[in-house]
Image (cartoon, rainbow, N blue to C red):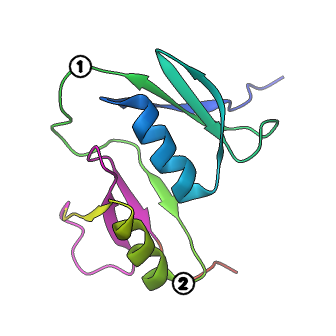
Amino acid sequence: MPSRWEQVVVDAADPARLARWWAEALGYVIVNEAPDEVEIRRAPDQMPGLLFTPVDGVKRVKNRLHIDLRPDDQEAEVERLVGMGARSVDIGQGDVPWVVLADPEGNEFCVLSGAST
């Protein structure tokens, strides 16, 4: 039997704060909160989740793994996420149909154009 994907672990200076930010951004719920980690999921019984754990130091280089979001309205979603504290970043993407943002701790993610068919 193959493995099941349970979660992606996100290193964070402030795991609780970043988990709450991503929960709001994705419409997820907090399913576990402990002093050393916070997990969010779409619903308590739905995997995979995002698990936020503490790390010392500041992020210094581009992520090697990132999340892509595909909203119905890219422009409105970028505006909403920036209003929540995300910021536009240039990682050398050039002229592309997606927008690269960073969460409040600098983790890059992409907002793709329009809902896929």
Q: Is residue 95 above or below residue 99?
A: below
As measured in the structure, the alpha-carbon distance from the residue carrying label 2 to the one carrying label 1 is 36 Å
**Left or right of residue 96: residue 69:** right
**Count of number-bearing discs:** 2
Residue with the mark numbered 1: 56
Residue with the mark numbered 2: 73
Residue 105 appears at what percent x and percent y? 28, 43
Whether 27 is among the magenta residues is no
Residue 13 appears at what percent x and percent y? 29, 29
Residues rendered magenta in the picture: 91-111
Q: Is residue 54 above or below residue 104?
A: above
Please name the amino acid that badge 1 sits on. Asp
Residue in the picture at 65% in, 49% down? 28
Please name the amino acid that badge 2 sits on. Asp
Which secondary structure is most common in the magenta stretch? loop
**Left or right of residue 83: residue 58:** left
Whether 100 is among the magenta residues is yes
**Left or right of residue 33: residue 60:** left
Residue in the picture at 18% in, 65% down? 90
Q: Which one is in front, 5 or 88?
A: 88
Residue in the picture at 31% in, 21% down? 55
